[in-house]
Amino acid sequence: MSGASLDWLERLRGRFLVFDGPDGSGKSTQLSRFTACCRERGVPVTEVREPGGTPIGEQIRRVLLDPANAEMDVRCEMLLYMASRAQLVHERIDPALRDGHLVISDRFVSSTLAYQGTAGGLSSDEIRDVARVAVGARMPDLVVIFDVDEATSARRLSPLLDRMEQKGSPFHRRVRAGYLDQASQDPSRHLVVDASRDADTVFAALMKELAARVATLAPLSLRA
Ligand code: TMP
């Protein structure tokens, strides 16, 4: 990619992006490639992941993903994800945005809406209420959803599944539907990328579609 064609990356300073999608969507690989590209271009990037991203959050992550905690109730699960997120916003995301960094989070509230909401049975209103308590007004400028079919995502997962990955096919079908629902209900805040293709093709599509979307973002001073 030529230098000039990447000028749009400059417009991401001080923005908050989320990369999200079902397990096995390849979002984390795409996130590493994208952050490397931003850094080469001189755009300061803070990269975080959920659950985790802080010392407290990483302890919560271990509880959430431990297959020994199979009896965990979905409300407990949702609150633990939100607790990790509250700490992440306070300790990493807000300070980085104040410093003018582009912040990219691997998962955010969109994951809770898909996994504990559409797939897990909690209402999206309840989840949004708890999210307001956990993160206040700190919502992303754009959520990029890496959409992948079940067969492709299953092929990409390691055979050692964590507690969430062990939930089975019908659950994961609902997760995918949950993401697509979010995108169709609020198209201006979501970008869906077909992530079933090889990593180079997905990255090329991501860069093209994101460039078009970044051009339409409201100026930072005007955002809610
Ligand atoms: P990861 O594999 O992308 O690191 O995510 C950990 C698992 O946690 C993954 O299966 C998705 C799940 N998850 C939820 O169920 N709800 C959430 O709010 C988040 C952030 C992740």
Image (cartoon, rainbow, N blue to C red):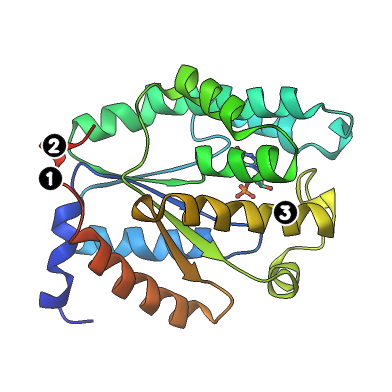
**At label 2, which amino acid type do we have?**
Leu
Q: Which residue position is annotated with label 3?
A: 174
* Ligand 1 lies under 8 Å from the Cβ of mark 1: no
Determine whether label 1 and label 2 are within 8 Å by CB: yes
Tell me the CA gap for discs 3 and 2. 35 Å
Mark 1 packing: few (<14 Cα in 10 Å), some, or many (20+)?
few
Q: Amino acid at mark 1?
A: Pro
Q: Which mark is residue 222?
A: 2
Query: Disc 1 designates what residue?
Result: 219
Between the C-alphas of marks 1 and 2, the distance is 6 Å
Please tell me whether mark 3 sits on a helix, a strand or a loop. Answer: helix
Quadrant of the rendered image holding ligand 1? top right
Q: Which quadrant, please, contains the C terminus? A: top left
Q: Position of residue 31 (x, y in %)?
A: 43, 59
Circle 3 packing at 10 Å, graded few (<14), some (14-19), many (20+), is some
Please say whether residue 18 is visible from this viewpoint. Answer: yes
Split into 4 quadrants, where in the image is the N terminus? bottom left
- N-term-proximal mark, 3 vs 1: 3
| x 48%, y 50%: residue | 185
Amino acid carrying label 3: it is Arg
